[in-house]
Image (spheres, rainbow, N blue to C red):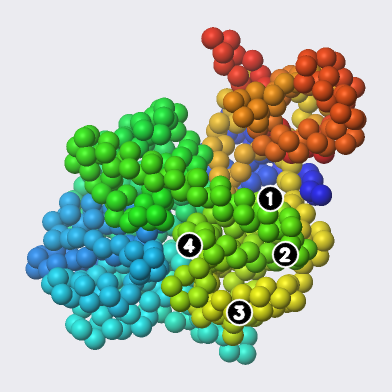
Amino acid sequence: MERWTLLRKGADFERIGKKFGISPRLACLIRNRDVVGDEAVDRYLNGTIADLYDGMLMKDMDRALDILREKIADHEKIRVIGDYDIDGINATYILLEGLERLGADVDSDIPDRMKDGYGLNIELIERAIQEGVDTIVTCDNGIAASEEIAYGKSLGMTIIVTDHHEVPYDEEEGEKHYRLPPADAVIDPKQPGCEYPFKGLCGAAIAYKLVEALCESMGKDVEDLDYLIENAAIATVGDVMDLENENRILVKEGLQMLTRTHNYGLRSLIECTGLEKDRIRAYHIGFVLGPCLNASGRLDTAKRALELLRAKNKKEADMLAGDLKALNDSRKDMTEIAVKQAVEQVETTSIGGDNVLLIYLPECHESLAGIVAGRIRERYYKPTFVLTDAEDGAKGSGRSIDAYHMYEGLSQCKDLLTKFGGHKLAAGLSLKKENIEPLRRLLNENATLQEEDLSEKVVIDMEMPFSCVTEALVQELSLLEPFGKGNTKPIFAAKNIEILSGRLLGKNKNVLKMQVRDSAQTEIEALCFSNTEQFLALLEERYGKHQVENMLIGRRTQMTISITYYPDINEYIGQKTPQIIITHYR
């Protein structure tokens, strides 16, 4: 059972509204997003590129710039080593483009997910040495690669780390001792002693900060590199960073740039996925473009996605975009099969009774384990690990809920694991197959989850009658965009709604369109896109099959329900009518 919570955060909404030319309702919604004080509200509503922080505030930035300027002047060979996900791919692209434009002799390498695993490894360093590389710059990885970096340094290499992950540490008597890699410069706002005011940047945004600062220090026009903000924006959304503070500005600006992008690869990908380029939202990066870029690193090589971003003409870009879309389509099919198998295990075996789900799918492609874990976590609202067969045992990923710290959960079972890493809400692990069952038992014995922890919390911004759903309101709500993690769409609630009639739409009959009426007698069209089967089952359980059947053939019914919703406008043949999108119900 979901827990519905109504936010009640106070402020002088009339005053804020007058000052910023917005309605008191919008001022209240901004306050609900923990944006407090006139300066923060102004930055939230009106922040631009000029409001981004100075990259020189990052620890070791000056050192990295000195090294890179010298290497460029001496024509030394520089290699960028990225990662195989959307953040790593865009970070690699940003560094390649930026360094190239500033005259560097630069190329790149990206590890193979299956062969190399995550991040910098000995083989990548040896390959660089053999190919005459003098300097390595990592992006979206490197902070945890102390041994590999020490090896590279022993061979006389220069190594600069740019990363955004947590710095590894050892804990003794409750005190953390951080282990920084022995690189020539380490740029990571999360490292101790870094004064940079915002710690939530992704790897690509940090790469952008580096090339921007380098450009400035070489006396070149920084505006020439502004176009790279669109890649930082794509990575910020794709890597599910909180859309607050600097990230909000990067994504807002980047989305605008994307509508007029000159990047052949992005233009082809937008075209082949059927998106309208002037209507791209953060949602489309997260659920359409991002998965295509990620699919290359999952099922093939991430170098394919990097090639797309670097394509020099439309013909090449069209071909690569088509390949990535096809890869993503097959990734979707493979995911559906694996999700079905996982659901079957939860529904038909004793695993379903566990508070921490550990599901072993030997046939599942190992790169899909995290996606499947995420889907199962959504469905049952329980922390979920999905394991698959790997070369030497089993390997997998986990996705968690707010009440369960996944990394700490694995730390308590480390004797059963050969390797693990991650943070509160996501983790990766490897282990011997004979340890799968003991791990499942131990994770559940150690978990202190209560029943209320396992019910999803639905946070409601405010109760609002349907008469308030107008074109002006929907227009004003767009000032809160971009929406995503850390800046979610506002959710409104209405109690005891009468369902007047309804019908199922779509080729799979999975969209429910209804006419509903609130207690003030305002009628409106309501759409339900997710879990329509569950929605109808709930009505049937409460009011009987006959009432539901009557509703679906357009007859008036006597059914009522409480809902949370998001206001919208339906445009059809030039006609605009208010409608609502139902998000939760009970």
In front: label 3 or label 1: 3
Q: What residue type is labelled 4?
A: Glu
Tally of numbered discs? 4
Near mark 4 (Cα within 10 A), the count class, few <14, some 14-19 or many ≥20, is many
Label 3 and label 2: CA atoms lie apart by: 16 Å
Q: Would you name the residue on which mark 1 appears?
A: 379
Crowding at dot 3, Cα within 10 Å, few <14 / some 14-19 / many 20+, comes out as some
Residue 113 is drawn in which quadrant? bottom left
Name the foreground residue: 253 vs 453: 453
Secondary structure at badge 1 equals helix
Q: Name the residue under label 3.
A: 435
Give the distance between the C-alpha atoms of the residues marked 2 and 1, in whole angstroms. 15 Å
Q: Which numbered disc flags the more N-terminal residue, 3 or 1?
A: 1
Give the spatial CA distance, label 2 vs label 4: 21 Å
| Distance in Å between CA atoms under marks 3 and 1 | 26 Å
The residue drawn where x is 22% and y is 65% is 79
Amino acid of disc 3: Asn
Q: Where is residue 382 in the image (x, y as percent from the top left)?
A: 70, 59
Q: Residue at x 67, y 73 (%)?
A: 440
| Residue in the image at 50% along x and 68% along y | 389
Q: Can residue 120 be seen in this view?
A: yes
Mark nearest the camera among 1 and 4 is 4
Residue under the image location 78 percent in, 16 percent down: 553
- Report the side of 50 relative to 215 (left or right): right
Q: Along the polypeptide, which appears first: circle 3 or circle 4?
A: 4
